[in-house]
Amino acid sequence: MNKSELIDAMASNSGLSKADAKRALDGFTTAVEGALKAGDKISLVGFGSFGISKRAARTGRNPQTGKEIKISAKNVVKFKAGADLSGKVN
């Protein structure tokens, strides 16, 4: 499902217009981005939680040449599904 299909589904499930659903989705993603940038964790009970995990610098290997390369440290976004979501999927 891509963004426009998600907007269509949100509009049909909530009774919102497609324009309102798009604004709601854009507002949600902007709020999540801002909270994660600030180092906060977002928890939606039953759905799941978004958080930041720090990945340490490490040495990797170029698969084409076999040459060692340095991979710098970075923050990665993690999502952990909640119990309700996991139960509905399985």
Image: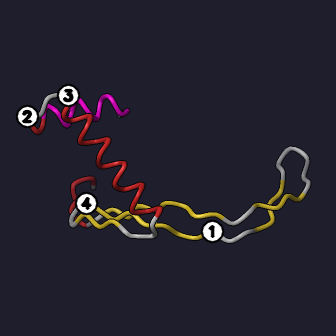
Residue 40 locus on image (x, y percent): 40, 70
Q: Per the image, is 7 magenta?
A: yes
Check if mark 3's residue and mark 4's residue have beta carbons within 8 Å: no
Q: Position of residue 64 (x, y in %)?
A: 86, 44
Residue drawn where x is 46% and y is 70% of the image: 39
Q: Residue at x 84, y 51 (%)?
A: 62
**Mark toward the start of the polypeptide (3 vs 4):** 3
Farthest residue toward the left? 15
- Residue type at numbered disc 2: Gly
Residue nearest the viewer, comparing 16 with 27: 27
SS for callout 1: strand
Q: Which residue is mark 4?
A: 47
In this rendering, which labeled residue sits more in front, label 4 or label 2?
2
* Cα distance in 3D space between marks 3 and 4: 23 Å
Mark 4 vs 1, N-terminal side = 4
What amino acid is at disc 3? Answer: Lys
Between the C-alphas of marks 3 and 1, the distance is: 38 Å
- Please, what secondary structure does the residue beneath circle 4 have? loop
Q: Which mark is residue 55?
A: 1
